[in-house]
Image: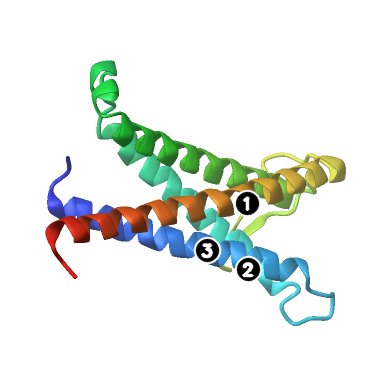
């Protein structure tokens, strides 16, 4: 178990990541309904791409630190099944986030356009996939984003239940 300051840091880090993801999903839903002459029609996708790159970087960094912290042996895994199922759900969440970000990046760069990062610099397209592949990646991106909404909602409910249970067992009102 990491020392308390690191645990607090990663809790805050996860909270900030959750806020970014919720904002990203909200912005993604909002921008799909915009018409061409709306003021946010061109700005919203640029912000969405920049936030997506930030989320992908944060998730990748968290995943690296999580995997470096040690993987339990099989015996430890069986002994603490609930904890490990929780860890497996986190790995699934990280995997879905990275896959959704990759599909979104592939969609954004499918025609060869670079992806802007908050107007600071552009990330060039690694390869040109074409419009048809871009449409498939867009569908994958949207599907994964919607499944992430469900998984994050379930994760949040479980986290709140756990916090309430801890408060109840400690006698905190």
In contact (CB < 8 Å): disc 1 and disc 2: no
Closer to us: 144 or 167: 167
Disc 2: which residue = 27
State how far apart marks 2 and 3 are (Cα). 9 Å
Q: Position of residue 95 (x, y in %)?
A: 51, 38
Counting residues from the start of the chain, the first of labels 2 and 3 encountered is: 3
Tag 2: Cα neighbours inside 10 Å, few (<14), some, or many (≥20)?
some
Counting residues from the start of the chain, the first of labels 3 and 1 encountered is: 3
Q: Position of residue 130 (x, y in %)?
A: 84, 42
Is 51 located above or below residue 142 in the figure?
below
Tag 3: Cα neighbours inside 10 Å, few (<14), some, or many (≥20)?
some
Q: Which mark is drawn over residue 22?
A: 3
How many dots with numbers? Answer: 3
Query: From this viewpoint, is residue 117 visible?
Result: no
Counting residues from the start of the chain, the first of labels 1 and 2 encountered is: 2
- In the rendered image, which quarter contains the C terminus? bottom left
Closer to us: 165 or 133: 165
Closer to us: 12 or 148: 148
Residue displayed at 71% across by 43% down: 140
At numbered mark 3, what does the secondary structure look like: helix, strand or loop?
helix
Location of residue 40 by image quarter: bottom right
Report the side of 104 relative to 81 (left or right).
Answer: right
Closer to us: 142 or 104: 142
In contact (CB < 8 Å): disc 3 and disc 1: no
Disc 1: which residue = 145
At numbered mark 2, what does the secondary structure look like: helix, strand or loop?
helix
Report the side of 24 relative to 156 (left or right).
Answer: right
- In the rendered image, which quarter contains the N terminus? top left
């Amino acid at each position: 178990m990491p020392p308390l300051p690191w645990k607090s840091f990663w809790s805050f880090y996860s909270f900030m990541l959750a806020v970014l993801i919720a904002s990203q999903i909200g912005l993604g839903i909002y921008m799909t309904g915009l018409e061409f002459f709306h003021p946010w029609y061109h700005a919203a996708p640029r912000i969405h791409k920049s936030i997506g790159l930030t989320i992908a970087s944060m998730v990748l960094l968290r995943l690296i630190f999580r995997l470096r912290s040690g993987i339990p042996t099989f015996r430890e895994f069986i002994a603490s099944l609930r904890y490990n199922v929780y860890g497996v759900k986190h790995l699934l969440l990280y995997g879905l986030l990275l896959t959704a970000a990759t599909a979104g990046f592939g969609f954004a760069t499918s025609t060869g356009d670079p992806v802007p990062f908050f107007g600071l610099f552009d990330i060039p397209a690694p390869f040109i996939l074409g419009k048809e592949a871009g449409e498939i990646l867009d569908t994958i991106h949207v599907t994964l984003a919607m499944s992430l909404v469900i998984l994050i909602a379930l994760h949040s409910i479980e986290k709140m239940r756990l916090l309430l249970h801890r408060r109840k067992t400690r006698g905190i009102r």
